[in-house]
């Protein structure tokens, strides 16, 4: 009985993780950058959903219509102004720049919104659907999962069927070759970062009704997102999706059968195992560094 | 000439008491203004500010020198040393967190400046025999003993613990386990969780499967709400939810009426307790800061008031220490007397209160002499 | 002037400083924080700046030293020096395990893996009873051969000593075979390997030295404050602060980390105690009642991490070689 409940619960939570991971994977693939500000971008999405709900009275899931383009624009600008300049710098400097940007974002939020955790309570925040076997599924998590599947599907179509999308995908496979083929890789970078930001913000908005909103709330998800990317294969959208669900389930199962204390350690150990034994992840290509 | 001389002398004599009161007494205040505890820290800051104003209205001039420790014991130590050696304070109120309070307390006797801890819970802070360390609030073991006493009449048999992996969580549950043993309660589940997780359902499912009569919770603000939401979702319905202070006593928690109703919590103070000035303090606080005060605000208020009043008469650190040791007060935290008992030194034997969320409001339900409403048991949705 | 002479002079000045400034505990306390961060960053620099291996999890060694020392003192009645030695051993074991995992990885993976290892150490310390769990370890009394450990001076000189040793080792390494090999590894690992340099051996050597020094600092910190918990000694934020200090000062230079510490630590303290805000008001530059005045009063103190973030971004964009990088043409 525990098993099924744990599994389903993990899959649903994993869906949100997946969205965060996909955004990060896209940035990794196209720009070869570890974005340590990813968690803070999620946090911004959470706050956007919160303000849309309390000031404009829009349901968090509906407010995605506003959040996605706004976040995309923010990420696009961020890339053009800051990230672009360090695209050929050593890895560690890139990491440190994104760390710095992340610190600015989270501490500005702290100054602006104070550290009071904000709670977004919708009418269905604690509702559950009860199915056979005494298993309950959280309504907001179910909705998030459905929306995540939808967005992932749309993204996949974009990447495989549209010209821009194909150009993006090509750049993530091999930046130099894409450039030689005449693709404007600078524009692709901005596009990728914008998309990555929009996905992160969406993940934040989706989890907002079941979590709490706080300037430091993004940090919990940052390391999880990295693990998911590595597990799925850096640059693989499908990989990150699958990786997210796997991590969600692993966490849930560890919590149930081991103990809640050690579940993060299990995730980190998996992370290290993947790095050591299959660094290309589940769906990445071998030899990609 | 003689007349002028006499009038000057008379004026000087008349001015003497004014001169004596002219220099305000300096008291230090160490608080978590930034950092993880900033939200609670805000309550302490506001409570202290109100105390200074009230003292001023009574003619007692106190200069409160505020320092931020950000919840970091290293900073608390630096703050204490700055206050004591450079700012010339004769007493210090604070810090808020137990870790910081422990570190500062260990230096108080070295610098010989009295420290009054307003709200830190760990027992050991006043169990080391430090002569210069005083504590106003009840220590951690009282949180659980008062909660268990409140429900003892209903003869519960089993208890489960769900608590944050923090200093406060772990130490409060340890003392709760001792108290539960004395009451003959059987422990059926023990779920320690890392804060900040989005999903507590696996832990709560394990608790539900153990079918406990009592669920004893220790969480901070946001986790408390998340836990209760997910508890409702999976249908965890014990005979009582017992919250040990912190997240289960905030206004925000009570407002989540779908999940907070009938949750019982232990607190150092409520606004409807019949201690002198308690109710009006809450009203004035709300008018001034547009928020309900937490018990931390009341603790800080009373601590600063006691330090200020005693300090303005004592004028030196040594006399302040003597004044704190000997004195007794009766204010919004009820009767206060710093005494040595049961291994504690300079500890105020503060009676904690038990409140329950009824119709979206906190009502004091235990002990009987403070409570106006009756405790509702068992818990239902 | 030879670098050794410079180190000696500056160490000499630092050694005399407390005696000259009248031993104000507050001032010495701030200086201890400066020396500690300077030493931590210099130790990190041996691996990060010279070998080019940026460890994002150095707090693990700091915490190893701190926890081992306090556990040895409180549970096994060791004296602080014995605890320190035990701490070095534990830190080196963690370093060897870490090295065997992360040194095979390149680029992003290396940094991320070092974080993962450090987090595993932190979570373990948080969950086990013998490390005090979430409650941490509080030390009541500690003594060492009659030296008064309630005074700050022993710790001031202790941190200073570790800093001098770090700088000395860095200086020695720069012109030794090990140093040349490490710099070759930093510039191009594959070329270095093709020349026959044993990558693993030299990287681990740098890591062990760095970890040992960091661990000693952790031990000193633990006995100085007498209270530790995972958020004080094992937090990711500490690891990042160490790196930022080195970067802003000038990574890969001898004095860069120390310069970074001398600038950033007092800045943080000044922001924390709101000295800037108060000074602006006192000198009438900003009126206390104005919007700006109130903003400064309420918020400047909280802004210390924000300032760090801004400095970091500006530094990476415009001064990637750090402050000392301005003064160097080639390194």
Image: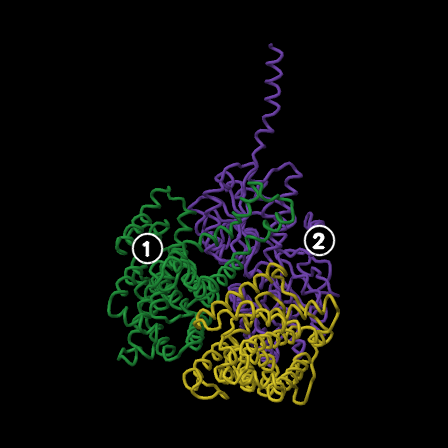
In the rendered view, would you say B239 is above or below B22? Answer: below
User: Where is residue A115 drawn, in percent x and y?
Assistant: 60, 61
Q: Determine the chain carrying the residue at label 2.
A: B
| Marks 1 and 2 belong to one chain | no
Q: How far apart are marks 1 and 2 (CA)?
A: 51 Å
Q: In which quarter of the image is the N terminus of chain B?
A: top right
Q: Determine the chain carrying the residue at label 1.
A: C
Tell me which residue sits at (72%, 67%) in the image: A54
Quarter of the image holding residue C186? bottom left
- Residue B286 is labelled as 2
The letter of the green chain is: C
The letter of the yellow chain is: A
- SS for callout 1: helix
User: Where is residue B54 drawn, in percent x and y?
Assistant: 66, 42
How busy is the neighbourhood of tag 2: few (under 14 within 10 Å), some, or many (20 plus)? Answer: few
In the rendered image of the structure, the colour used to display chain B is purple
1 and 2 marks in contact (CB < 8 Å): no
In the picture provided, is B335 more to the left or to the right than C153? Answer: right
How busy is the neighbourhood of tag 1: few (under 14 within 10 Å), some, or many (20 plus)? Answer: some
In the rendered view, would you say B90 is above or below A179? Answer: above
Give whichever of A61, A246 is nearer the camera: A61
Give whichever of A75, A151 is nearer the camera: A75
Q: Name the residue under label 1.
A: C158
Q: How is the image coloured?
A: by chain
User: Where is residue C258 drawn, in percent x and y?
Assistant: 37, 57
């Amino acid at each position: 009985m525990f098993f099924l409940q744990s599994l389903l619960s993990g899959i649903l939570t994993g869906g949100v993780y997946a969205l965060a991971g996909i955004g990060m994977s896209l940035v990794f693939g196209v720009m070869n950058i570890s974005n340590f500000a990813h968690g803070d971008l999620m946090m911004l999405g959470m706050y956007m959903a919160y303000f849309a709900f309390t000031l404009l009275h829009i349901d968090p899931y509906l407010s995605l219509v506003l959040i996605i383009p706004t976040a995309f624009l923010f990420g696009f600008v961020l890339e053009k102004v800051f990230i672009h300049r360090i695209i050929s710098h050593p890895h560690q400097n890139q990491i440190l720049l994104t760390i710095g940007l992340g610190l600015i974002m989270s501490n500005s939020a702290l100054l602006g919104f104070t550290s009071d955790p904000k709670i977004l309570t919708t009418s269905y925040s604690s509702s559950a659907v009860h199915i056979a076997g005494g298993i309950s599924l959280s309504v907001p998590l179910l909705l998030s999962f459905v929306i995540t599947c939808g967005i992932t599907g749309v993204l996949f179509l974009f990447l495989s069927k549209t010209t821009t999308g194909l150009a993006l995908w090509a750049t993530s496979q091999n930046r130099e070759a894409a450039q030689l083929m005449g693709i404007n890789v600078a524009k692709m970078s901005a596009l990728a970062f914008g998309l990555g930001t929009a996905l992160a913000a969406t993940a934040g908005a989706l989890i907002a009704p079941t979590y709490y909103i706080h300037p430091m709330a993004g940090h919990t998800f940052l390391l999880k997102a990295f693990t998911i990317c590595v597990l799925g294969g850096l640059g693989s959208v499908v990989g990150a999706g699958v990786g997210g669900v796997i991590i969600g389930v692993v966490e849930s199962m560890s919590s149930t059968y081991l103990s809640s204390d050690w579940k993060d350690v299990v995730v980190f150990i998996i992370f290290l195992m993947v790095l050591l034994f299959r660094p290309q992840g589940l769906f990445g290509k071998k030899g990609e560094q | 000439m003689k007349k002028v001389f006499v009038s000057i002398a008379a004026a000087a004599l008349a001015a003497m008491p004014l001169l004596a009161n002219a220099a305000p007494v300096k008291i230090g205040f160490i608080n978590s203004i930034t950092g993880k505890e900033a939200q609670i820290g805000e309550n302490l800051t506001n409570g202290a500010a109100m105390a200074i104003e009230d003292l001023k209205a009574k003619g007692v001039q106190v200069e409160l020198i505020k320092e931020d420790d950000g919840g970091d014991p290293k900073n608390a130590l630096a703050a204490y040393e700055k206050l004591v050696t450079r700012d010339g304070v004769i007493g210090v109120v604070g810090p808020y967190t137990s870790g910081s309070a422990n570190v500062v307390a260990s230096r108080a006797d070295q610098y010989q400046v009295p420290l009054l801890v307003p709200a830190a819970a760990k027992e050991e802070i006043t169990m080391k025999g430090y002569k210069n360390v005083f504590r106003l609030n009840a220590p951690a073991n009282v949180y659980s003993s008062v909660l268990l006493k409140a429900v003892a009449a209903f003869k519960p048999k089993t208890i489960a613990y769900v608590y944050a992996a923090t200093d406060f969580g772990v130490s409060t549950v340890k003392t709760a386990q001792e108290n539960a043993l004395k009451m003959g309660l059987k422990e059926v589940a023990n779920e320690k969780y890392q804060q900040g997780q989005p999903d507590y359902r696996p832990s709560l499912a394990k608790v539900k499967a153990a079918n406990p009569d009592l669920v004893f919770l220790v969480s901070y603000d946001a986790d408390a709400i998340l836990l209760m939401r997910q508890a409702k979702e999976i249908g965890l319905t014990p005979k009582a939810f017992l919250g040990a202070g912190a997240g289960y006593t905030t206004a925000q928690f009570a407002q989540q009426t779908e999940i907070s109703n009938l949750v019982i919590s232990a607190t150092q103070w409520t606004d409807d307790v019949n201690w002198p000035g308690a109710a009006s303090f809450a009203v004035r606080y709300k008018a001034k800061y547009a928020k309900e005060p937490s018990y931390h605000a009341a603790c800080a208020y009373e601590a600063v008031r006691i330090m200020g009043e005693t300090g303005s008469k004592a004028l030196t650190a040594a006399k302040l220490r003597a004044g704190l040791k000997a004195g007794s007060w009766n204010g919004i935290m009820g009767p206060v007397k710093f005494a040595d008992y049961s291994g504690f030194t300079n500890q105020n034997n503060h009676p904690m209160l038990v409140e329950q969320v009824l119709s979206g409001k906190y009502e004091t339900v235990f002990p009987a002499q403070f409570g106006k409403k009756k405790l509702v048991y068992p818990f239902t949705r | 002037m030879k670098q050794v002479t410079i180190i000696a002079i500056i160490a000499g000045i630092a050694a005399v400083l407390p005696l000259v400034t009248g031993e104000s505990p507050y001032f010495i306390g701030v200086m201890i924080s400066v020396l500690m961060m300077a030493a931590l960053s210099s130790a990190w620099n041996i691996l990060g700046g010279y070998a080019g291996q940026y460890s994002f999890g150095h707090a693990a060694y700091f915490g190893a030293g701190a926890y081992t020392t306090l556990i040895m003192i409180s549970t096994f009645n060791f004296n602080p020096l014995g605890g320190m030695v035990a701490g070095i051993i534990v830190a080196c074991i963690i370093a060897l395990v870490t090295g065997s995992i992360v040194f095979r990885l390149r680029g992003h993976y290396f940094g991320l893996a070092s974080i993962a290892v450090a987090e595993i150490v932190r979570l373990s310390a948080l969950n086990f009873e013998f490390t005090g769990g979430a409650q941490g370890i509080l030390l009541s009394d500690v003594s060492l051969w009659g030296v008064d450990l309630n005074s700050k001076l022993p710790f001031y000189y202790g941190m200073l000593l570790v800093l001098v040793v770090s700088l000395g080792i860095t200086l020695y390494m720069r012109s030794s075979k090990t140093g040349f090999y490490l710099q070759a590894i930093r510039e191009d690992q594959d070329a270095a390997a093709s020349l026959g340099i044993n990558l693993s051996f030299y990287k681990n050597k740098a890591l062990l030295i760095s970890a040992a020094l960091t661990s000693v600092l952790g031990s000193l910190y633990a006995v100085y404050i007498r209270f530790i918990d995972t958020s004080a000694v094992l937090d990711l934020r500490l690891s990042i602060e160490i790196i930022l200090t080195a970067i802003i000062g000038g990574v890969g230079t001898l004095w860069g980390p120390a310069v970074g510490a001398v600038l950033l630590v007092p800045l943080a303290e000044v922001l924390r105690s709101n000295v800037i805000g108060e000074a602006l008001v006192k000198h009438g530059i900003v009126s206390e009642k104005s919007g700006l005045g109130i903003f400064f009063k309420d918020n400047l103190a909280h802004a210390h991490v924000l300032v760090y973030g801004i400095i970091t971004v500006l530094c990476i964009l415009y001064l990637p070689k750090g402050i000392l990088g301005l003064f160097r043409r080639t390194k």
